[in-house]
Image (cartoon, rainbow, N blue to C red):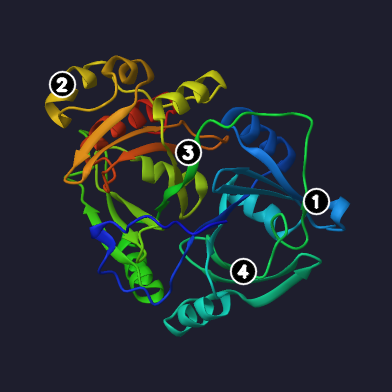
Amino acid sequence: MHKQTEEIPKIYQDTPDFMPINGTDYLELYVSNSKQAAHFYRSAMGFKPLAYSGLETQNRETESYVVVQDKIRLVLTSPLKSGSVIGKHIDKHGDGVKVTALWVDDASYAYQEAIKRGAKSYMEPRVEEDEHGRVVRSGIHTYGEVVHIFVERKDYGGIFLPGYKEWSSDYETEDVGLKFVDHMVGNVELGMMNEWVKFYEEVMGFKQIMSFDDKDISTEYTALMSKVMSNGNGRIKFPINEPAAGLKKSQVDEYLEFYEGAGVQHIAVATDDIISTVTQLKQRGIDFLEVPDTYYDVLNERVGPIDEDIEKLRKLKILVDRDDEGYLLQIFTKTVQARPTMFFEIIQRKGATSFGKGNFKALFEALEREQELRGTL
């Protein structure tokens, strides 16, 4: 992997950075059937096979398939026996993100700094080696049962991590233009958002770069509050949501009910051509939330001139918003597992550093329509 070298946007430049992070190393999802999940991400979302761990690598406890698209690596892990920690996690939460792995230059230093500032240890620094070199990993707990693992791989030349072998397949898929993880959103319980904002500020040196309250993110029926935390170079961004009082059950309330606790609500992945990416994803069977056609009737008035053909955006139901730095285009999938919990956002930034505040109402109403169909509004 290569560090990003682009100029750091002004919004991030004064953030203290005692824990430098180069980017997202991988996301590990605990899933009930790793082989089938890997096929889904390859067939439907254009990921390619990268690495495997399981019985063929003398791993008798778990099976993991690693899929990759540009800088995005997903590790899909299932237990091989009953009564396991992973199995109990899936039984409680369903499929979802367990690990957000952060790529650092020194995993021992990152761990020590986090523990010194109050983090709870998940994994003390450990050296993992094979014929391709050594990796150092360490980890801390965050909200719910989500953990951050620090990955130091400067002395490693293997395909992924020690314990994995290269995975290839005769089944070939074309990527859909997904580039990297733009941000990852966590849902936490009522009253806990500020606790986790404080955690990221004090433990990891993150800065709150944006805040949205129930006046910003609400409809007639539901509302939520959100604060966006970012590391010093802006490569890691974690919006944190909590429910707000409303007439009916919000999307965050629904998530917390069915996930049975705090966890990752959605993964936002970047593209350089959202029209092409979404067109391909739809052709491969990915379902997206839809907004009414009337959203596009006043789009130019609201966001000003844009490069894209509005009729193409209308057809695909892609949302647009503008801030002081430029504009962005975004769209949200429906949930990608049985429970109404985790989903994906596809985002293209054309200068904008924000998160689509102008689209919150339209998005919430789309989510409410889905909740109404599920009988959970």
Secondary structure category for the residue under label 2 = loop
Q: Which residue is mark 4?
A: 154
Mark 4 falls on what kind of element?
loop
Please say whether residue 296 is visible from this viewpoint: yes
Residue where numbered disc 3 is placed: 343
| In this rendering, the label closer to the viewer, 2 or 3 | 2
From the top left corner, tell me how far across and down residue 290 is, in percent.
36, 23
Q: Earlier in the sequence, mark 2 or mark 4?
A: 4
Q: Which residue is mark 1?
A: 80
Are the residues at dot 4 and dot 1 in contact (C-beta closer than 8 Å)?
no
In the displayed structure, 84 sits above or below 342; it is: below
Q: CA distance from mark 2 to mark 4?
A: 50 Å
Horizontal arrangement in the rendering, residue 90 relative to residue 179 (left or right): right
Instruction: For label 2, count other residues whose C-alpha is less than 10 Å away and answer few (under 14), some (14-19) or many (20+).
Output: few
Measured as percent of width and height from the top left, residue 332 is found at 40, 33
Mark earlier in primary sequence (2, 3): 2
Judging depth in this view, the residue of 230 and 188 nearest the camera is 230
Residue 341 visible to the viewer: no
Question: Element under label 3?
Answer: strand
Circle 4 packing at 10 Å, graded few (<14), some (14-19), many (20+), is some
* 10 over 219 or under it: above or below: below
| Contact between labelled residues 3 and 4, with CB atoms less than 8 Å apart | no
In 3D space, how far apart are the residues under numbered discs 4 and 3 (Cα atoms)? Answer: 32 Å
**Image quadrant assignment for residue 320:** top left
Tell me the kind of residue under disc 2: Val
Quarter of the image with the C terminus in it? top left
Q: Which residue is mark 2?
A: 298
